[in-house]
Amino acid sequence: MLQKKICMLGAPAVGKTSLISRYVRQIFSDTYLSTIGVKIDEKDVFTGNQHIKLLIWDLFGTTDPLNLPDSYLRGMAGYILVADGTRSETLEMARNIKSGIDELRGELPFIVAINKHDLDAEWQIAPEDIDTLTGMGWEIVITSAKSGAGVETLFQQLAGKTVELAA
Amino acid sequence: MANRSHPGEIIQGVLRQARIEVTNRNEQDELRKLRDLLLKEEQSELDQLKSQLNSLELSSEELSEILPEAILISNRKNNRLKEALAPSTIEAIRAIIRQDPKYFSDAIYPVMGPAIRKSVLNSLRSMVESINEVLANSLSLRGLQWRWQAMRTGKSFAEVALVNSLLYRVEQVFLIHRETGLLLKNVVAPRIEMEHPEMVSGMLTAIQDFVRDSFGPNTQGTLEKLQVGELNVWIEQGPRAYLAAVIRGNAPHDLRIVLQNTLERIHLDHGHSMKAFSGDATPFEATRQMLASCLLVQTSTPRKKKPYLAWGGLGLIGTLMLGWLGFVGWQNWQWDSYLENLNNAPGLVITRTDTENGKQVLYGLRDPLAPPAASYVGNSGVDPDDIVERLEPYLSFSPQFVTARARQFLNAPESISFSYANGTLFLHGRASNEWLESARDAAAFIPGVSAINEEGMIASESSRMMDLKIEIEKTTIRFSRGRLLLDGQEELVQEIVTKLNGLEQLAKKTGKTTRINILGHSDSIGSERINNNISRQRAEFVQNMLKLRGITSENIVISGLGTQRLSEFAEDNTEANRRVTFEVIIE
């Protein structure tokens, strides 16, 4: 078994916590997020014949990683950038966060989750926007916390990336 | 001024000058010689080095080969190199510390820890000694107990006192990677359950970071202790990993030293693995033993209590054993007295006893007419439910069983009683001739009976006749002064009739004969002749009444007795004597 620390990052109210809450093992209450700004959950992922235990540091929502305590980001093997598909600006914020992280911690494996896919009518992100990002080498998963769509893929792919890097 | 000097002085001055120059020249020569003598080799080496340094090719590579050697040699010769290097080394260290204090502290961490502790321990030891003196006068009961413990264990009183006031148990130890907050290894005390230690490790790390960041990022201190009710989490920081010990109760400071030692050893042994750690905790399996050594339990307090517990326990066991022995003795006594009851009981022969599944088993013989052995417990205290009878049936010839058997066998009425001696069955009481005849025949089949004796028997017919005779003879028919019956006397006469008829029937059955005397009586008033007369008339009157009611027996005799049999219970002249009575003779 391998343990990997990963962080959930994204602008406020993009649905980071609800995105994972149904799919991970939780022993700490969400109040930690509002008090100490972090909550740690656990997710077992199997890629190939490798068992990876992801320790997910769910961090409070912010657009600037400099707001985040450096110690929370320290030692992470990768991260999930969450954006809200019904608010196109959150994707821009994700780009900010990404460049902030690159500055603080160097380039690390990451996956972008564009969330709230269930709110089809309010969807604001055009396929071209996504193409632009994929063109930059970003890996993007469209997710829905409500239906659970994409969530497993999200963890699976990030886990795979962290192992690739280590190998 | 020199010009005006005395020529002699000038000469002296010149001479002095010349001497100095000569001396200087001599000294320089001597120094050169000395230098050549002392440092010739170094000088030549230095010259060599000088020439090597002058040429670029010679520099780094060749120097790297020569320099260590040179330093070694220099060190062997004198301290000059050290002295020369010291100021710059100190400056270098200062610079390093200024630049990154963490780097330096990480480097010396494994060395400094023990050294600091050693000195702290020394000062603590002297403190303990002083406490010892302060406590030396303590004379409380507890103090005396501790003193005794100290004497026994050879420890100082202060140590014992300290130890006795502490009680704790290290339930879990986590070795957590500092950088990632990932769990490297955790150990758990027996019977403690721990779920998801990985998440706990992460959260512990996050909380530490939170505390440090919240109370000033510049503070050098770290979170050392968390307290949740009875649970304490002690955190021992190391450069690459930290230990978190979950402790129940109050642990002594010594535990912190144990944690420090452990963490230092882990850093020494696994420092490289920690640096290279990228999620695979397998290499840290090897720390299990070391971590498990931190799972300490303070047993001193229980140890202090143990003697009392032990004595109490021994006392209890002793009491229980005595009680049990007493109980067993009492039970044996009960059992013996019960067996004695059984041995005295007729119709029961106990040949042996046994115990089976906690029950007493009786072997032997029992007459079917004898009550079950369990019924003999009486007040012996033996529980009838604890008795199992394995008794074979047999016939007892003891009198009570022969007679009981006879009663059963002969279907004897209640009015009969039996006795038995030497093979003869004695019958007593009343029974019908019919029954007696059948009994006479059947008795021969009663085991143990070879003869019957019926002298004590009265046939029920005869006895009934006797009863009737008595009843009739008790009856008095009362008269007025003349020959007239008093009121209610007719009914009495009717009763007499019924009884006489019964008597007659029984007499026919038994082949006996009855004779009835009707006796007339009178009071003492009047002359004897008249009284005799009237008494006879009264008897005749009753006879006539009987005749009218069907009693026509020839065996009825009347007589007038006058005053010959005056009533014992009344005055002679009263009406009680004006009466008729009966006599019945059965032949």
Image (spheres, coloured by chain):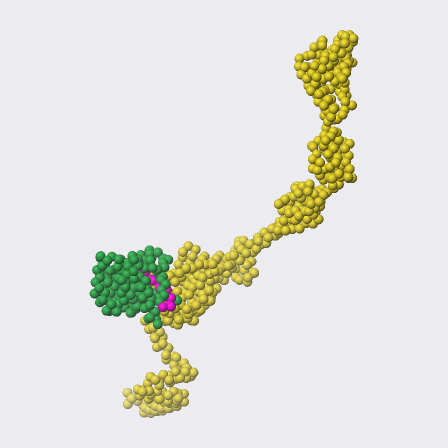
Chain colours: A green, B yellow
Query: Bounds of the magenta span?
Result: A48-59
Please, what is the dominant secondary structure of the magenta stretch? Answer: strand
Q: Is residue B91 above or below residue B194?
A: below
Q: Nearer the viewer, residue B322 or B539?
A: B539
Q: Is residue B228 above or below residue B431?
A: below
Residue B153 horizontal/vertical position (percent): 55, 61
Specify whether B175 is left or right of B405. left
Q: Nearer the viewer, residue A78 or B31?
A: A78
Q: Is residue B543 visible?
A: yes
Q: Is residue B323 above or below residue B37?
A: above
The tally of labels here is 0
Specify whether B554 is left or right of B298. right
Q: Is residue B361 above or below residue B430?
A: below
Q: Tell me what residue is drawn at x 30 percent, y 86 percent.
A: B56
Specify whether A17 is left or right of B524. left
Q: Quadrant of the N terminus of chain B?
A: bottom left
Q: Nearer the viewer, residue B463 or A31?
A: B463
| Residue B317 lies in the magenta stretch | no
Q: Tell me what residue is drawn at x 37 percent, y 71 percent.
A: B276
Residue B91 occupies quadrant: bottom left
Residue A41 horizontal/vertical position (percent): 35, 60
| Residue A49 lies in the magenta stretch | yes
Q: Quadrant of the C terminus of chain B?
A: top right
Q: Tell me what residue is drawn at x 65 percent, y 43 percent.
A: B374
Residue B184 occupies quadrant: bottom left
Q: Nearer the viewer, residue B45 or B405?
A: B405
Specify whether B111 is left or right of B386. left
Residue A134 horizontal/vertical position (percent): 24, 67
Q: Tell me what residue is drawn at x 34 percent, y 75 percent.
A: B92
Q: Is residue B131 visible?
A: no
